[in-house]
Image (cartoon, rainbow, N blue to C red):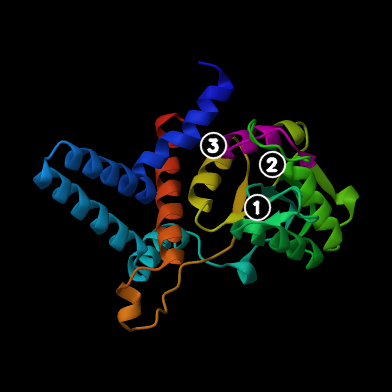
Amino acid sequence: MPAELQLFLSKVLPLTLLPEGLVTLALVGACLALLLRATRIAGVLAVFALAIFWLSAMPIFANWLLGTLERQYPPNSAALPKAELAIVLGGAVSAPKAPHPTPELYDASDRVWYAAHLYRSGQVKRMVVVGGQLPWEQAAQPEGEVIRDMLVTLGVPSEAIMVGTSSRNTYENATEAASILRGIPLDRVLLVTSAAHMPRALAIFRKAGFPAEPAPCDFRASDRLTGTALDWLPQASAFAMTSGALREWIGYYAYKWRGWL
């Protein structure tokens, strides 16, 4: 199977296991059942779709599920050891796309700010940024270069930044970083990525031979909800959090099955 097709399937197939995929499949099935006059089956599928949607969109559930990832590596800025360099993972920004004149910042763009903070506070002396672009994207610039430019704007000298622009997932991030740093002795590196992504990313980088220490950011789960009925009512932000957490857990076990961590 061509590598690009494998990459495409790795991005698409998990959608069937995520809330948006399950709800869509159930509703399509309900519509087909109605056309076939199988009203009982249609009703069961409609109730299933509603149950998945409601559970996934409840803040109390979304916070708990995302927290199962983020609590593995809690905020630790005060206790972070100093290191020669930080490795900053992509998935945070994209190059400008018409009609927008500036880079698009995703939820994970905290990674860029936090990496700049680590440098400016003297926590690291250099950094490696790894991030390419998917084959079907039409970005004018690989993500690694966009992050580098943003880091320079935030006060990091360009000569302190090494960039990799060919990796398209976390496993490729690790192999590309290893290629960039081949022959350079490292006692310790700080791995900068979102807190929910850290369990999978850290396991991959350590298996690749990096003496990596977690430097998580982009925490989104909260232990302090409103304490009202609103915590149990559907919200779009909670639905997105649940989907993101499930995607990360699916990715973790898929990588484990492939022997990448």
Residue range corresponding to the magenta coloring: 163-178
Asked if labels 2 and 1 touch by Cβ distance under 8 angstroms, the answer is yes
Q: Quadrant of residue 64?
A: bottom left
Q: Quadrant of residue 56?
A: bottom left
Residue at left 86%, top 63%? 155
Q: Say few, some or many: other residues with alpha carbon within 10 Å of mark 1 (under 14 / 14 to 19 / 20 or more).
A: many
Q: CA distance from mark 1 to mark 3?
A: 23 Å
Mark 2, residue position: 131
Element type at marker 1? loop
Indicate left or right for 25 with 121 as reference.
Answer: left
Kindly tell me whether residue 199 is visible in this rendering.
yes
Q: CA distance from mark 3 to mark 2?
A: 19 Å
Element type at marker 2? loop
Circle on res. 22: none
Q: Amino acid at mark 2?
A: Gly
Indicate left or right for 50 with 117 as reference.
Answer: left
Is the residue 119 above or below the residue 203 in the image?
A: below
Q: Amino acid at mark 1?
A: Ala
Residue at the limit of the structure toward the left, as seen here: 40
Is the residue 244 above or below the residue 26 in the image?
A: below
Asked if labels 3 and 1 touch by Cβ distance under 8 angstroms, the answer is no
Residue at the limit of the structure toward the top, as seen here: 1
